[in-house]
Image (cartoon, helix red, strand yellow):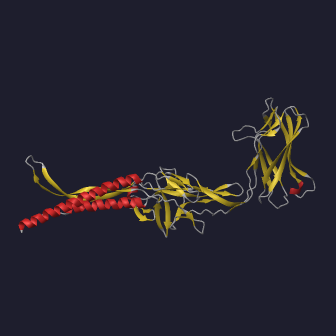
Amino acid sequence: MASFSVPLSGLQASSSALNVIGNNLANLNTDGYKNQTLSFGDIFSQIQGTSGNGDPIQIGSGVQIEGTSSNLTNGSVNSTGTASNMALQGNGYFVVSSNGVTSYTRNGDFTVNSSGQLTTATGELVMGFPATNGTVSTSGVLAPITVNANGTLPAVATSSFEVSANLDSASPVGTTFNTPLTVYDSLGTPQTLNIQYTNTGTNAWSYSVTLPGSATGSAAPTTTLASGTMSFSSSGQLTSPTGSVPAISITGLADGAANMSLTWNLNDSAGNPTITQQNTASALNTTPTQNGFAAGALTGYSVLADGIVQGQYSNGQTLALGQVAVANFANPQGLTQSGDGNEQATSGSGAAVVGIAGVGGNGSITGGAVEGSNVSLSNEFANMIVAQQSYDANAKVLTTLDQVDQSTIQMVA
């Protein structure tokens, strides 16, 4: 009697292949989904003997599924314009948690819950490294990423400023040049200083830094905070003072802010003097800079390539709110799927190695985007044709065996 188990195993294998193909096609538009394939192996029963030359006579018993594998190549990056969305390109998975259960996902279609925490569409919290006063420590314990933790950024008083300007060497003695400068006190109130340069002779200028009298409640129009002289070389380079003008003090501010001590930096970051004297009109080279700012409210945030969630404030400042964690595995194929785009670590995958994007072989993050499925429609259709043909062929073998059996039974009868 014929053995029906061989073509039946082929039918089952082809049916399983079609199921996998169908699942791939069903998830064609699932964010972060990775295309899957089946691998097969033959079933050997026993050696029937040997041929005349000693070769074994081997008859197989069909086919079996040996395993599944995921295609871990990147899906396309699809821009969404939603700040909470993230697309991971390269190795790694986002770390999410719900009720103490940690999962891993490539689906970066994140949103924000009522507590301001980043979550998946099904409510798992997106985990990462929180920030304290804009500083992220990646050595700490993972915690939910909150995007409104610093809703208001307190004011920071100005402690230093820099002015880049040229003073006209051809101007007559007594010529003045004024540059206004806005600084901020400890309450975030803008205070307007005025720096006046006066030509006092060849290669020599005096300067004075003043503040309106109203800022300190003085009846005088202005209060002089600092004054001195500047000397220049024959090539127009500042020779005195050098480095900085320190300890420009502001006391008794009318708004009740703390006293201020300002340093006027006279060199740029490369150590070059920022005040020059050339035979061209007196003018600012760039807008003066200072390191203070008023209080600001959080107006938005964005995710950088390294996973830093950077808050933007109404005062023009930016501050790190946290950093999204990225996990990798020795064998990502060993992860088990748990639905909703999530996967769980197993002994086969090894323990998660948690780090940050762009470090230790981890991929980078694109904010305001999601990673699409990497399923290829044309490849799946081609695979479907092959699986269908295999199914039809095995069904034909099964029908033929049935006909042979019926003929045998009739002969016996």
Can I make out residue 27 in this image?
yes
Going 13% across and 64% down the picture, which residue do you hit? Answer: 405
Q: Which one is nearer the viewer's eye here, 30 or 222? A: 30
Image coords of residue 124 (percent x, y): 51, 66
Image coords of residue 352 (percent x, y): 44, 58
- Residue 404 occupies quadrant: bottom left
> Does residue 17 appear to the left or right of 80 in the view shown?
left
Image coords of residue 306 (percent x, y): 55, 52
Going 87% across and 39% down the picture, which residue do you hit? Answer: 206
Q: Quadrant of the C terminus?
A: bottom left
Q: Which one is nearer the viewer's eye here, 71 or 7? A: 7
> Does residue 116 appear to the left or right of 336 in the view shown?
right
Going 26% across and 58% down the picture, which residue do you hit? Answer: 392
Image coords of residue 235 (percent x, y): 79, 29
- Residue 399 occupies quadrant: bottom left
Can I make out residue 141 in this image?
no
Q: Which one is nearer the viewer's eye here, 142 or 89? A: 89
As drawn, 255 above or below 195: below
Q: Which one is nearer the viewer's eye here, 20 or 322? A: 20
In the orientation shown, which residue stands out farthest toward the bottom? 99
- Residue 389 occupies quadrant: bottom left
Q: Quadrant of the N terminus?
A: bottom left
